[in-house]
Image: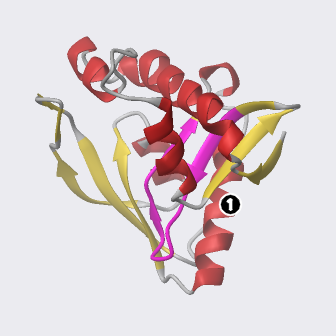
Amino acid sequence: MHLRDYDPADAAATLAVFDRAVRLTASHDYTPEQVAAWAPHDDGERDLEAWAARRAGARTRVACSGERVVGFTDVDTDGYVDMMFVDPDVARQGVASALLAWVVQTATRDGATELTTHASRTARPFFERHGFVLVREQRPVLRGVELVNFAMRRPLGAA
């Protein structure tokens, strides 16, 4: 596995990783209605161009196995991690840990003093194992459906 910068040609692959991670992995922690709101089937609510624009507008790093994109993450200059998703086929193989190491390095270089994220129920244990602490539980509404996530933070320099 290796990490590299996101390329606009990665849009479809990163969207596929997102969809698979939500539908196959996070579905153990969320209801079918919540999963459908979070990762709707391609019914016109999302389009690849909008996804590509969002990814291109963020500092995104992808994890690849050979040429196949198997995970991705991003971090802004304040240390906020908006997305971190790994394909279920490679879950628990160190992909997310490698992506988080890049996040830490990048945010530290930017001068951020902490990392923050809004972690799903599924991702919360991963972030806790990597030094993040719970700030608060949140209940955002997406496409009319209430979800649950967790505002979390990690001071930089923590293990």
Pick out the residue farthest to the bottom.
111
The residue indicated by pointer 1 is 101
The residue lying toward the viewer, choosing from 22 and 143, is 143
Amino acid on which the number 1 mark rests in the picture: Ala
**Depth check: 32 or 17 in front?**
17
Please tell me whether residue 98 is drawn above or below residue 104 in the rendered image: above
Closer to us: 144 or 10: 10
Q: Residue at x 61, y 79 (%)?
A: 108
Residue drawn at the location 69% of the way across and 45% of the way down: 62
User: In the rendered structure, does residue 26 fall within the stretch colored magenta?
Assistant: no
Q: Residue shown at 33%/15% (left/top)?
A: 43
The residue closer to the viewer here, 29 or 145, is 145
Residue drawn at (54%, 30%), measured in percent from left and top? Answer: 15
What is the x, y in percent for residue 33? 21, 16
Left or right: residue 16 compared with residue 99: left
Q: Quadrant of residue 2?
A: top right
Q: Is residue 66 above or below residue 80?
A: above
Question: With 153 as the anchor, is 67 left or right in this view?
Answer: right
What segment is highlighted magenta in the picture? 70-85
Which quarter of the rendered picture does the N terminus lie within? top right
Q: Quadrant of residue 148?
A: top left
- Position of the C terminus, as image quadrant, is bottom right
Q: Is residue 82 magenta?
A: yes
- Mark 1: give few (<14), some (14-19) or many (20+) Cα within 10 Å: few
